[in-house]
Image (spheres, rainbow, N blue to C red):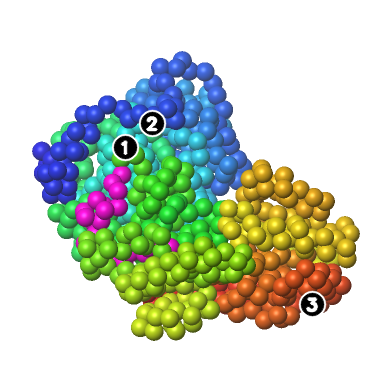
Amino acid sequence: MQRFRGSLALRGWRGTVARVRQEFTGPPDDTDDLVLLPLDEPFAPFTLPRADVPHVSIVIPVHGKLAYTLACLRSLARHGAKASFETIVVDDASPDDSASVLTQVEGLRLLRNERNVGFVDSCNAGAAAARGEFLLFLNNDTQVTPGWLDALLACFTQRPDCGMAGPRLVYPDGRLQEAGGLVFADGSCWNTGRFEARNAPAYQYRRRTDYVTGAAMLLRREVFQRVGGFDVRYRPAYYEDTDLAFAVRDLGLEVYYEPASTVIHCEGITSGTDLATGTKRHQAINQATFATKWATQLTVQPPPSTPLDRAIRWRSRGRVLVVDGTMPDPARDSGSMRLCGILRLLDAQGWSTCFFPDDRRAGSLDMLALGELGCETLAGPESEDLPQWLARFGRQLHAVILCRHTVAGQYAGLVRRHAPQARLIFDTVDLHFLREQRAAEVAGNHALSRQAAASQRSEMALIEQSDVTVVVSAHEQVLLSRMVPGARVELLSNIHEVHASTRTHAERRDLVFIGGWQHPPNADAIRWIAGAILPRLRQALPGLRVHLLGDMPDNARAELARPGLEIHGRVAQLDPWLDGCLASLAPLRFGAGVKGKINMAMSHGLPVIGTTIAVEGMQLTDGSDVLVADDPDAYADAVLRLVRDAALWQRLSERGVENVRRHFSAEAAAATLERMLG
């Protein structure tokens, strides 16, 4: 009854009825990828991975329930991890033959308590014996799944502020058990997502949370020691995990829920579910202890009656919705790379972000990819369309970023209607009308000229309607300042990590072009390379090759096939070419915005030869940061200069890196975002 009343307060009647229905619903349809090992398998000795210097120490306290312990250990043996680990079982005076059987598991470190001391002391004993950099506390009534441990470790690698991480916990029937935990101002706790579909979009993104359960939690051993381990005031169990999370947060670190890691948990096997009997009765007692210890910190937690959708985002600066045509794919195009960089920065600045793909297409892996950036994806079979979602949640939004005029034109009015308080930001990505105008001029196409005029009217109307317009190039910022004098136009360009050069001039050969065929300026440039530039280059340097990297249909491959043109298609890693080629080509004859292919090359210290249009608005000077060439002869001359002049190559390499650092770094983009949203 207490939980029912709590659900009413947090979810309301509608949400509570839906929640009750979930509890009595059968297993979900997506359980095929969950392989639960049987409990009745006859015991036969098996071997666990082991390491003399383990990266992770897995600590499993046990008190009986041998069948569950063996299934847990078998899952560790089956799935392993890329990271090295050791497994420590602390037998807490089990009443069955756990100790004698577990001695037969090779690779297992078995510790034995002389008397039953409970979860807290058993975990502390296991931690004291551990040798790994990380401690992973794991209940014996769990089973792990492929990639679970490496995904948790990735959270620490990708989030410098991560002090503790916990996986997505699911029931054996596949339903979600917990996606991080909430703590309210009175010290009461709530497991997020219980009995909901584990692959629901709301639980597919990494986020800061108040605590993660001790059934499966990872933290550095040094941090565990700094906070004094599990507080013995919570003997024998309950609230020790919440207390540990608060102690970690008190160090200035964060606790993260990591959806890319999945652990199956048979909740209640260890301590039961009756709050009035057994170990479980300590839950209420220890809540009072916790509330007293952390009284000051609890004053900033949400009140107990706070709706769940607000409590989850209680510590965020506000909610930001981002809308684009499709899910971003950094391996596909520079616009996607830029958008992912923006989402990463928004999360780092404390904003709660959600992304809606206008085509509604987003698989689980797509959601997890955005989830690594702390972004929720509003897509999936059961998700609402954007008008419905805005009608429900629009009043919660601090800002809405609409990407590209084709998307912004659909939703700007809806945003104004359902989220009048939100800052409306139109991200042009690049000025569409400008690209179309230039394409029309190159092709002499009057129909395309008319289309460009229509696009210009659309983009100008959106700029006037928006609070802020974002462009990627300084040239476009100046252009719009003349065309729409009263508009607020911010420069938020491409975002690149700086790598610098790893090989010398003497170690390099050949040229590279980066860009997919589906983008018209790229297709035109590739045809120009194949038909005019490459023949001129091979006259001067007969053995020279140009490597094309990017999606290309079979018919185009057949059309372009010729000696010296190496068509690789989309590649998993650009590094081998960026680190091995002499220069990158950017022979674009029309387009707009900033060219990601130029940024990418320069971030690796690879000099670029590009047209005047290609380098437009990028703060580049011919001969100093880049070589500009607007016809095949000029390309041949530029390549010959780079082949013969190692000092020129080195200067362009260093200046290109500096250009990216100054104008296209995360720091530059972060400052613009703060100015726009702060």
- Identify the residue at horizontal 40%, vertical 21% (top origin): 39
Which segment did they paint magenta? 383-404
First in sequence: mark 1 vs mark 3: 1
Q: Which residue is mark 1?
A: 197
Q: Alpha-carbon distance for marks 2 and 1?
A: 9 Å
Residue located beneath label 2 in the image: 30
Q: For the residue marked with disc 2, what is the amino acid?
A: Asp
Q: Are marks 2 and 1 in contact (CB under 8 Å)?
A: yes
| Distance Cα–Cα, label 1 vs label 3 | 59 Å
Residue at the image point whose x is 35% and y is 71% from the top: 461
Q: Is residue 381 above or below residue 579?
A: above
Counting residues from the start of the chain, the first of labels 2 and 3 encountered is: 2
* Labels 1 & 3 near each other (Cβ < 8 A): no
The Cα–Cα distance between marks 2 and 3, rounded to whole angstroms, is 58 Å
What kind of residue is marked 3? Leu
Q: Secondary structure at mark 1?
A: loop
In the image, residue 96 sits, relative to residue 628, either above or below, namely: above
Q: Position of residue 485 (x, y in %)?
A: 39, 84
Q: In this rendering, which labeled residue sits more in front, label 2 or label 3?
A: 3
* Image mark for residue 320: none
Locate residue 135 relative to residue 180 in the image: left or right.
right
Q: In front: 324, or 437?
A: 437
| Front position in the image: 431 or 572 | 431
10 Å crowding of disc 1: few (<14), some (14-19), many (20+): many
To which residue does mark 3 refer?
Answer: 648
Q: Quadrant of residue 596?
A: bottom right
Q: Choose between 244 and 637: the one closer to the eye.
A: 637
**Residue 263 seen in the current view:** yes
